[in-house]
Amino acid sequence: MSEIPLTHILFVSTALFFIGMYGLFTRRNMITMLMSIELILNSVNINFVAFNKYLYSDQLNGVFFTIFIIAIAAAEAAVGIAIIINLYRGHHSIDVEDAGEMKY
């Protein structure tokens, strides 16, 4: 069984990163922006695991960083969704451009 080359894994990770950046900068919906941030974090996780496997296969530093990032991403998603729900309840919109016009 042959291994997948590092360049292929990095290509997928780069594609995920730039799809996330595109979604973050072009979308107006806060939920879509939150999903784009998750894509960016997942591309970083792929990089950590790939470099850990190909460069330091006897250590688990990349895996530990990945687990830490997954925990941070879960907390970020929970807080982000709570903020989005609170904004929607008060203003009946989750559009980013409407957020500038909101009066508290």
Image (spheres, rainbow, N blue to C red):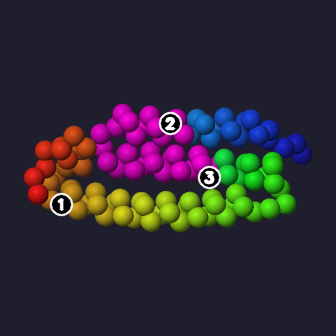
Q: Is residue 102 above or below residue 77?
A: above
What percent of the width, then of the height, locates residue 73? 49, 59
**The residue positioned farthest toward the left in the image shown:** 103
Q: Secondary structure at mark 3?
A: helix
Mark pair 1, 3: CA separation: 34 Å
Q: Nearer the viewer, residue 93 or 48?
A: 48
Q: Amino acid at mark 2?
A: Ile
User: Which residue is located at x 62 percent, y 64 percent?
Assistant: 67
Q: Amino acid at mark 1?
A: Arg
Residue receiving disc 1 = 89
Q: Earlier in the sequence, mark 1 or mark 3?
A: 3
> Pointers 2 and 1 in contact (CB under 8 A)?
no
Q: Secondary structure at mark 2?
A: helix
Residue receiving disc 3 = 45
Q: Earlier in the sequence, mark 2 or mark 1?
A: 2
Q: Nearer the viewer, mark 3 or mark 2?
A: 3
Residue receiving disc 2 = 19
Mark 1 Cα shell of 10 Å, populated few (<14), some (14-19), many (≥20): few
What percent of the width, then of the height, locates residue 19? 50, 36
Mark pair 2, 1: CA separation: 30 Å
Residue 4 on the magenta segment: no
Identify the magenta region.
Answer: 17-46
